Amino acid sequence: MTLFKFTTDKIIRRLRWVTLLVMLLDAVITVLGQPASFWHDPSTTTEGTPIVRFFLARGILPYVVMGSLYVAGALFIASITPKRIGLTILFFTILGHSFGFTTWLRYHFHCNVSIDLIRVGIAVLIMSAIYQEKD
């Protein structure tokens, strides 16, 4: 008897990779958007999400450790819950982190045009994760 039964659903298994990509993009763009002073004094972080700001203000190592635990936990929970709940977790995670990194791109890096291309790219990845032709 196993403690947790991981999903065998192909849609959730493929969609986890899209979710992981979006979460990593958000984390990397968040770090790239920090002011130069952040690397000497992490308390000068500029982050809108309170929980992320809490760990980022303590330095890059706490941010990476807690971010890694968060990513692993979210993907783990999406993998052991029933399909409908797992899909809901993955879609909300994709939407939330997409909003997070596109906000950085728009307001900090001033990349308005590329945001639409990234959104289309994420939509294509989601569709290819959901729809696969049968062999």
Image (cartoon, rainbow, N blue to C red):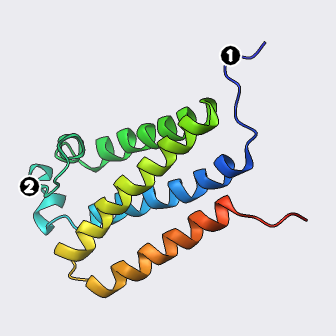
- Location of residue 95 in the rendering, given as x and y in whole percent from the top left corner: 39, 56
Closer to us: 7 or 40: 7
Q: Amino acid at mark 1?
A: Leu
Pointer 1 or 2: first along the chain: 1
Label 2: how many residues lie within 10 Å, few (<14), some (14-19) or many (20+)? Answer: some
- Location of residue 36 in the rendering, given as x and y in whole percent from the top left corner: 14, 68
For the N terminus, which image quadrant? top right
Residue annotated with mark 1 = 3
Query: Could you tell whether 32 is left or right of 75 in the image?
Result: left
Q: Amino acid at mark 2?
A: Thr
- Location of residue 90 in the rendering, given as x and y in whole percent from the top left corner: 51, 47
- Location of residue 13 in the rendering, given as x and y in whole percent from the top left corner: 68, 48
The residue lying at 14 percent from left, 66 percent from top is 35
The residue lying at 41 percent from left, 39 percent from top is 70
Closer to us: 133 or 38: 133
The image quadrant of residue 76 is top right
The residue lying at 28 percent from left, 61 percent from top is 30
Residue 75 visible, this angle: yes
Q: Residue furthest right?
A: 135
Residue 108 visible, this angle: no
Q: Secondary structure at mark 2?
A: helix
Closer to us: 91 or 31: 91
Distance from the alpha carbon under mark 1 to that under mark 2: 43 Å
- Nearest to the eye among marks 1 and 2: give it: 1
Closer to us: 42 or 135: 135
Mark sitting on residue 72: none
Q: Secondary structure at mark 1?
A: loop
Label 1: how many residues lie within 10 Å, few (<14), some (14-19) or many (20+)? Answer: few
The residue lying at 42 percent from left, 49 percent from top is 93
Residue annotated with mark 2 = 44
The image quadrant of residue 6 is top right
